[in-house]
Amino acid sequence: MRPTFLRALRGALTAGAAAGLIATATTVPAEAASGYDRCPWGSLCVFSDPLGKGQMLVVKGGMLDLGPWDNRISSFANYTDWPVCFNIAPGLDPKEGASHYYPGQGSFDESATPELDNAVSSLDLGPEADHFCASESRYAVYQWGSEPKPRPAALPTYGAFGDVNNDRYADLFSRNKFGQLWTSHASDSAGKNRLVGSGWNAMTQLARHGDYNGDAKEDLYARDKAGVLWFYPGRGDGTFGTRVRVGGGWNTMRDLAAAGDLTGDGKADLLAADGAGTLWTYPGDAKGAFGARKKVGGGWKAMNELVGAGDMNSDKRADLVARDTAGKLWFYPGNGRGAFGTRKLIGTGGWNKFTELAGLGDITGDGRPDLIAHAPGQTSLRLYPGTGAAGGGLKAPKTFGSLPSSVLVF
Ligand SMILES: [Ca+2]
Ligand SMILES: [Ca+2]
Ligand SMILES: [Ca+2]
Ligand SMILES: [Ca+2]
């Protein structure tokens, strides 16, 4: 059931704020000691008593748990431009109910949702907190469409990446604004969405493409803010064992792409483009680390996104997809010796609108790797099925999932 909304008259609020600004220059209004007016303009405030009375907390953003404020919110003043979602369970779990409110003020005891009174345990504040309140709130990515389908059973390793729990369905990793990392499995698969862990906002790059330590389980690389690259060995269920430090100095790289086996030795490799525009291959050692890097070439400064998309042209060699700063998408066929053949244009323009392009392997179940794309301000994910043709082309996109625009998918 959709919640009822409290809508405030924005004109009246604006007038109140202007009056408050003038008042602070002279004297504090008497009612400011206990009412909604205590809340600074532009902030969300929650109160321990009805009608903006009692203790006040100025909320900075979303809160997965409320600490000492757990089950203590009776009223609120939302003087931001965003809706707020109040949730009865911690962690924005929808199981006990939630409601969203647009900017304004309200007292739960006299609202359409009195069950929230002294019962709120988590909240979210943001441009999409109305859309992603209640049932949509818990998972970073909460819905898949009719895709994906299981990939063909006999697909060799180079075509089988993207499936962290080995059930033949491609899996998505996503990071929400709270720094939580989730795995999202296909709705038809045996797995479920699950929380991998917290603290992942410390990472400035996340890259995956199959198995990097020879145990047939998919792994993850992450670069932290200090430039240290970490190897996270997959456990085969979407979670990871103890991470291993690969090395420091990776902040000189503008982009990293885990790309599968580019060198033809059966071991998955990493690509990295540095600030000067040089592209490097880091040959994987099948132990999670890399041998001496090899220069692929210069001029890669024109590219602002690299995707290790897999074998897009069906020649059994891993390939690269790259987006240039003009918004064109290019296919670089891998030559199996750590470099690439002549590139082909596969997207004529407009690709700069996407924040993130990612290769998850075969999502559509035809044995050919696909691409996913996510644009800022868009609450849907797009799937571009790969054609597997010689030119590495893509088919028309489909919408197949929904997520807050702040979520990073890879
Ligand atoms: Ca899977
Ligand atoms: Ca592994
Ligand atoms: Ca290799
Ligand atoms: Ca290929």
Image (cartoon, rainbow, N blue to C red):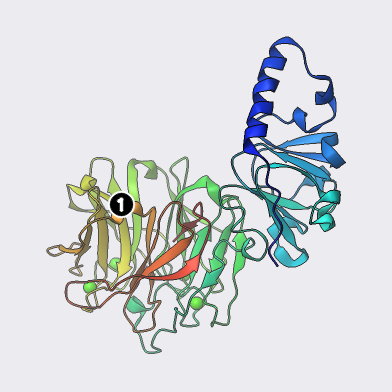
Q: Residue at image x 26%, y 62%? A: 321
Pick the front one: 342 or 127: 127
* Other residues around mark 1 within 10 Å, as few (<14) / some (14–19) / many (≥20): some
x%, y% of residue 220? 46, 62
Which image quarter is the C terminus in?
bottom left
Q: Residue at image x 58%, y 51%? A: 179
Q: Residue at image x 75%, y 56%? A: 90
Q: Residue at image x 73%, y 31%? A: 39
In the figure, 75 relative to 207: above or below? above
Which image quarter is the N terminus in?
bottom right
Pick the front one: 295 or 290: 295
x%, y% of residue 32? 80, 25
Pick the front one: 339 or 350: 350
Q: Which residue is mark 1?
A: 352
Query: Which residue extends farthest left?
Result: 342
Query: Which residue extends farthest top?
Result: 26
In the figure, 347 relative to 66: above or below? below
Tell me the element at label 1: helix
